[in-house]
Image: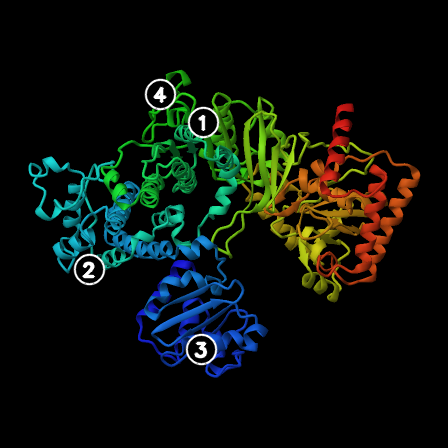
Amino acid sequence: MNAVEIEEAVSELALQPFEAQEFPFSFLEAFGNKTTTIKKLRKGTSNKTDVQGAILQRNNIHILTTVDGKVIESLNSLRTSPSTKKNKAEFILATDGIDFQAENMFTGETVACEYKDFHNYFGFFLSLANITTVPQIVESSFDIKATGRLNKLYVELLEHNPDWATIERRPDMNHFLARLIFCFFAEDTDIFKDENLFTGTIQKMSNPDASNTHEVMSEIFRAMDTKLKIREKENIKVWGKKFPYVNGELFSGSTEVPKFTKIARSYLLHVGSLDWKQINPDIFGSMIQAVADEDERGSLGMHYTSVPNILKVLNPLFLDDLREQLEKAEDNSRKLLNLRNRMARIRVFDPACGSGNFLVIAYKEMRKIENEINIKRGETNKASEIPLTNFRGIELKDFSAEVARLALIIAEYQCDVLYRGQRLALAEFLPLDAQNWITKGNALKIDWFSVCPPTGTGVKLQGDDLFSTPLEQAQIDFDNEGGETYICGNPPYIGSQDQSKQQKADLQSAFNGVIKSTKSIDYVSGWFIKASSYIRNTKSSYSFVTTNSICQGRQVAVLWPSFLGQNLEIQFAEPSFLWSNLASKKAQVIVSIIGVGPKSKNSKKLFSNNHILKTNFIGPYLVPNFDTIVSPSRKVLSNLTSMTNGSMPNDGGGLILNIDEYRKLTELKKNNKYCKRFLGSSDSIQGGMRYCIWINQNDLEEVKDISWILERIKTVRTHRENSKRPETQALANYPYYFGERRHQDGVALLVPRHSSEKRPYLPSIIVDENTVIGDSAIAMYNPEMKDFAILSSKIHLVWSATVCGKIKDDYRYSNTLGWNTFPLPTLTQKNKEDLTASAEEILISRERHFPATIADLYDPEKMPEDLRLAHERNDEVLERIYIGRKFKNDTERLEKLFELYTKMTSNK
């Protein structure tokens, strides 16, 4: 269950008559517990309580229903119960059907409310459903509740208005939804002066069967787009005249409304009955966006970018500096005024703004600073000098752009209420400003100067004009001379393999010949090159959330030289971390935050786990003080044995045998001398057993009479003939062979391409000549023991993790990047002997624990002590070759490696 579904189930439970005996089971069921789980609790087999009448679900919750007036005593009995602590219950809950109280035993947070209202606190208990709870979500459970209600209404309207569900009319439907949201908010925050004006008018003036609901609503919308002085002339109905003139283009254009069913009308009234004062524009936009996005609707309430994560971008970009200047100004009125004037000229620009989260949070944080200035200057009721139109955005989806603008309008009003009071906020709220400061369009095709002129006040671009002829900066007016522009956001990632033709064309357009080819770079790179071009000519800097892949592997050498060094530098960064959302079971996104600006003498900042490392400069691998870029090499640059890719079957499964198939051949005494063991990355780590058909040219005549081989060969030929790739089709003439044969006689070292980041060392195994290494791994034929020692070292792991890159947070090994480029000092004979001895000790330690797999042996929690010590000795032997002692940390290791690499490549 997702958060919206849970909210609906909890709300439904709160409406039902209270049944003390059933409540604990119904409560757990509302949070997604399966029927079998509930049955076990009912029978008592999994109920771990020691309190009479209570239900305790291990690791989750201890619940007790009680008689009237005994809730506090009951909660205390759960709190002091030994079973609560023993079974690690996160929550305790007591209720008598009148009062409701709960406590989080881990954090000490509590809930105390009337029973009928407990559904409003469902966010407090979300971890019961294995949903990661973020403080802002728990505090803003309303947003999830509103999203769920709106989704029901939206789906019902689309179902009964199929013409509105078409691609052509979807913008109309989305615009309608934005109007509804404004009306719900306005009637609960006194923007509409009469209480319950919108929902009440719909209820009174529309028929119970909903036959004219669309007509009533259309008239309301028409009224809010008509100035008061011409309403008589426009024949606005009497009940419509109560609505204010809103303007701002929110109600302009067509006032057509989809037709309502009786159910849709009831949904509408239900949504209107919610308390929309609680709306949180920080995250509301992304929640509501999911309602209108068919692809997102299946995970309603799941997508949430936490405010702390957004502040990781905004704080070092410019907010920290504003706060620092505020602190330095103290009570100096002139300095405070200068700071306020400076803030009034700051532009915040998100060229992939989605539903506006970054812009909303930037606006609210700046208003907070401005308010502190006003308090210090004794101007507490002063109107804000920070224009909402200074928060610019570009968004591809039209509805997201509308929601972003609406979220900013709501944020402005809420800030005015907070800092100036309700009366002054209302006096200046309507009519809305009609300027279009959120642009709908393709950010990689639009000229950013036309959307966010760095010094002017106007917006040169509106709507979806892609500007085939870009505006020159000279065409921009200069009404706001001296203002700063800060570009920020979370652009779409999309790896090179997943990009559409249009997206690849977007990248080519964005780079416009700056690099030879954009085929191998991530889509997010387009925002980096556009932002770099923008700030090179302005008083600006930028910071984006990005996949960590652009700071790893082959992309580094392609992307970063295209803009770094041209008077631009990385000013701050936070290397790989998990970009959190509300869904604990969705695919994790590992990202980096990178801030780029004009070169300066100021120290640069690397953020990690709430620590800040100050450094002279930051390189593209997000390593301090080294701007070296490692390019792939086809040859080893140090004295190491070369590696190659494994052999690729390209066979449709015809040449590969599982263990059962191989055993069957052995039992039947079939001719299996043409089989070898086949190992890929996963097999080598997990101990998998596969085999393959391996035939040499001089065996062809003999195998033509072996039926089971002929059946397999037929499968291979068919697979290759049906391929769309000409190269694979040509291989159909050689169905006995692997598509790519790289196997060699003799011992080989198998290195997995992918492995878990949890392992303290890169895994590898030594195999004999009767084992074929698959293409999911890398092979080193006839290795020396020193090669195994180096490959198995911490210093090589650190180098590989930095330059090869990762998939999510897992290691992605490359021989051309990780091995061939590895900087190694010249080894003496004694060095080689010492490394051979330490390598042998690692292998012997592994053998002692046979048949443990690599996964078993290198589990950081279970790694055998003798193997750990063998690796540590190996590390010390190797690191002494570099600097005569062990390195203090990974930073020191990388500094030495980059130093050696620079010397090594400059000599070459």
Report crowding for label 4: few under 14, some 14 to 19, many 20 or more residues within 10 A (C-alpha): few
Percent across and percent down for residue 184 are 26, 50
At mark 1, the secondary structure is: loop
Residue type pointed to by label 2? Lys
Check disc 1 and report the residue beneath it.
484
Check disc 2 and report the residue beneath it.
262
For residue 877, which quarter of the picture?
top right
Residue at the image point whose x is 55% and y is 30% from the top: 596
Residue type pointed to by label 1? Glu
Of callouts 1 and 3, the N-terminal one: 3
Q: CA distance from mark 4 to mark 2?
A: 53 Å
Q: CA distance from mark 3 to mark 2?
A: 46 Å
Residue type pointed to by label 3? Glu
Q: Nearer the viewer, residue 438 or 215?
A: 438
Check disc 3 and report the residue beneath it.
73
The answer to whether mark 1 and mark 2 are in CB contact below 8 A is no
Q: CA distance from mark 1 to mark 2?
A: 53 Å
Note whether residue 123 is visible: yes
Residue that sits furthest to the top in the current view: 474
Q: Which mark is residue 506?
A: none
| Left or right: 804, with 512 as reference point | right
| Left or right: 758, with 341 as reference point | right
